Image (tube, grey):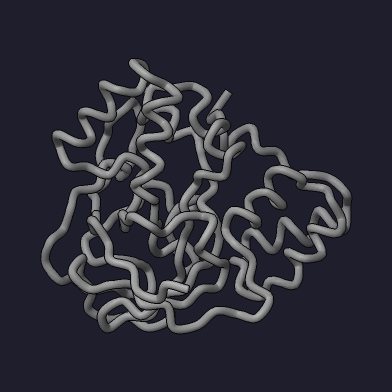
Amino acid sequence: METKHYLTTVYCGKTAEIYGMETAINKQPVNTSLYLSLKGLAGDECADKLYHGGLERALHQYPIEHYAYWQEKYGAQYRDKYAEKVNRKIAGMGENLSSIGMTEQNVYLGDRYQWGEAIIEVSQPRSPCFKLNKRWGIESFSVDMQEISRCGWLYRVIQPGMVSVNEPLELIARVDNAITISSVCEMFFGDPLNQEKLALLRQQTKLSDSWMDRVVQRLATNEVESWAFRLLGPA
């Protein structure tokens, strides 16, 4: 098991009116050391604090490998926006951390990493939303991302401190019953009313409160909450 992972880029962003919405999705690279608080990186903003950010969504990491997949899938429809991302050196998915070698298949729920002075812990997969559709100009982007679990993941901050792109994420703890982010997505999105899988998720004490609340509700009602607004936006 590889325990040290080096980042390619650290991104922070300011809220702006772009792509027909208010968003901080176009984050810019930061090459200097900066402070990571319980709520996120210094200077990083969030437009919609109801659905983004907060103590259990303080950081978002997205594997750089996935960009090649999206370019192959969408072709010319995606290429111009991808060129914009590369040329302007902006984050394409609103990510704070960009990496090679860390994916949903080898990152586990609850994984705890030392990053510089800080300690961070994987709290949940990223829930794709309609803002990705607007950012990329592809109506089905969020749905497609959810279906194949190339969502990235979020962190809570256990210990604040100074961090930088030059310091690796060093795995320092993994819970005994840990499951991969890919598996969490498959259970939560792919088979959302499977009682056995929901019971397994119910045992994941490191799962964020918002996701756990939905797991508990599904177990109690045998119904899935509506995803329409999150995936497609206002009607």
The image quarter containing residue 168 is: bottom left
Question: Which residue is depicted at the point 38% across and 62% down?
Answer: 59
Work out which quarter of the rendered image holds the C terminus and state it.
Answer: top right
Is residue 53 shown above or below 164?
above
User: Foreground: 201 or 159?
Assistant: 201
User: Foreground: 42 or 185?
Assistant: 185
The reply to whether residue 157 is in sight is: no
Please state if 156 lies on the left or on the right of 231 as rendered: left
Question: Which residue is depicted at the point 36% across and 30% down?
Answer: 135
Question: Which residue is depicted at the point 48% across and 57% down?
Answer: 153
Name of the residue lying farthest toward the front:
1
Is residue 219 shown above or below 147?
below
Q: Position of residue 34 (x, y in %)?
A: 18, 71
Please state if 73 lies on the left or on the right of 179 as rendered: left
Q: Position of residue 195 (x, y in %)?
A: 87, 56
Please state if 233 lies on the left or on the right of 196 as rendered: left
Name of the residue lying farthest toward the top:
76
User: Foreground: 170 or 225?
Assistant: 170
Is residue 193 shown above or below 73?
below
Q: Position of residue 61 (x, y in %)?
A: 39, 56
The image quarter containing residue 38 is: bottom left
Question: Which residue is depicted at the point 68% across and 71% down?
Answer: 204
The reply to whether residue 38 is in sight is: yes
